[in-house]
Image (spheres, helix red, strand yellow):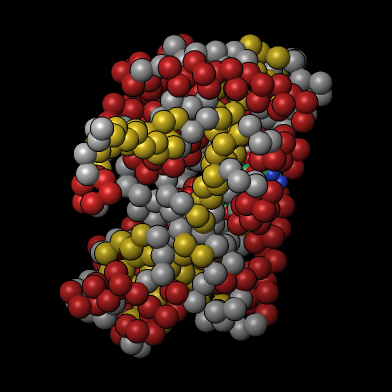
Amino acid sequence: MNKTILKKSLYIGGSYVEGSSYKSLRSPHSGEVIAEIPVGTREDMRRAIDHAAEAAKVMAKTPAHQRAAILQNVSLLLKERKEEAARILTLEAAKPLSVARGEIARTIETYQFAADEARRLHGETIPMDASAMGENRIAYTVRRPVGIVGAITPFNFPFNLVAHKLGPAFAAGNPVILKPADQTPLSAFFIAELFEQAGLPAGALQVVTGRGSEVGDELVCDERVKVITFTGSPEVGKSIREKAGLKRVVLELGSNSGLIIDEGFDIDPIIKRTVTGAFTYMGQVCISLQRIFVHRSLYDTFVDKFVAETKNLRIGDPGDETTDIAALISQKDVERIASWVKEAEESGARVLTGGVENNVVKPTVIVDAAPEAKVCAKETFAPVVVITPFDTFEEAIDAVNDSTYGLQAGVYTNSMEHAFQAAELLDVGGVMINDFPTFRVDQMPYGGVKESGVGREGIKYATEEMTELKLVCFNRNR
Ligand code: NAP
């Protein structure tokens, strides 16, 4: 029996436009073709930018209460269709269903936060007479929309990370051109449909699929685009920054997040949570727990309990309710991570549990790895965690900081002094005291230092990035 394959179109200027060529989108789990996706061209992207320039004028005149209402409508519409949305994630990204449902619940909230932010956006009055030259002047600032926003997104949270770009951009009154990751375009088309239904003006959201190096590059290089908001790998992030010219660039990049478990901490209640931090969505999370540093007095017990809990994770079809671990996003990534684990073993590391089965990397726990081994020093973006003992707290802080990345870090400690020390000395964008580094809620400021990025997301912070601060000054001197 022939199955009908879904054929998608580019979404440009409020219309669905056929692509000049198409690419088959395959399920990472089954390898089956699940849709035909248009391969947009540079010309398609230039057309989208033309439309966005028109939509920018409409959006700039759309009052805050209307922008808020649109965002709130999207949040409600997504709530109504949440199961369908979760199934899209399972299909195109092999995200286990329970994790996919969690992402949709967060996305519903993220759009709600954006609606709130649209209503709250404001400037301030400036105390002009604080300077003798400012006497008899009244000045205030307003936050104006910046203009066209180019959003380039990764495969791993295709609903919620897209919401972290669309929500703030619309809250601030800007149009957006979205270039989703090659593997996850269906979620992008789905959300565009909801925005259309929610009353967003035509052309204010456009979705252009295609190669990052072509349509993404065109978006980055066009001078009419005022902000590039990118989430993805450091390699691509750096190349975008080099090409973006004077436009504002927000980069949310990778990490090899570290966790310290201090002397005397009761480890039993945190075993499940640390296993979750390391292996949720097969470690394909930017703040996935990759390096665990445990005080030597707790090390052996922690390792035994962590490995035992890891072995309870269920491998299977991402569409099954009970599956914890499914296929990695691509065979290329399976091969990459297998070679990194082999390299670590060759230099003396021991794999306590793990292995590869077809397109699945089993949750892998490594000990005795050298800090310069790729499984420690680079971002694995796979279900691989390394556990290392330490003797002094200072040593543990140095070990977490010994990284080219700095997104978030976690510390479990009973010592107030150590907690303050960690808060002060960890060179990261966010420090989680008595939690894993994988903690995030969507209103908090979120972003990294070093190769983990530039700028902050979290709705309020990202909305500010998508505005221009304008000063208005009245002179009352005659
Ligand atoms: P990626 O390969 O860097 O791709 C991200 C996006 O960039 C995709 O849409 C991609 O398009 C596009 N792209 C590729 N080359 C480009 C170019 N030359 N110019 C413009 N755009 C280009 O990342 P990924 O594999 O999808 O995602 C994994 C990475 O994202 C990890 O490093 C992870 O840590 C990071 N991440 C960070 C955060 C955070 O908030 N800090 C959150 C999630 C993920 P194609 O797919 O068409 O190539």
| Residue 68 rendering spot, x and y as whole percentages | 34, 21
Q: Residue at x 57, y 36 (%)?
A: 226
Image quarter in which the C terminus is found: top left
- Using the image, determine if residue 474 lies above or below residue 8: below
In-front residue for pair 247/411 = 247
| Residue 443 rendering spot, x and y as whole percentages | 32, 42
Res 422 → quadrant: bottom left
In-front residue for pair 409/117 = 117
Res 424 → quadrant: bottom left
Residue at far right of view: 21
| Residue 466 rendering spot, x and y as whole percentages | 45, 37
Q: Does residue 159 appear in this view?
A: no
Q: Is residue 341 left or right of residue 104?
A: right
Residue at far bottom of view: 391
- Using the image, determine if residue 395 lies above or below residue 312: below
Q: Residue at x 37, y 71 (%)?
A: 426
Image quarter in which the N terminus is found: top right
Q: Residue at x 66, y 40 (%)?
A: 220
Res 301 → quadrant: bottom left
Q: Is residue 175 left or right of residue 400?
A: right
Q: Does residue 422 appear in this view?
A: yes
Q: Residue at x 69, y 40 (%)?
A: 221
- Using the image, determine if residue 404 lies above or below residue 75: below
Total labels: the figure holds: 0
In-front residue for pair 349/288 = 288
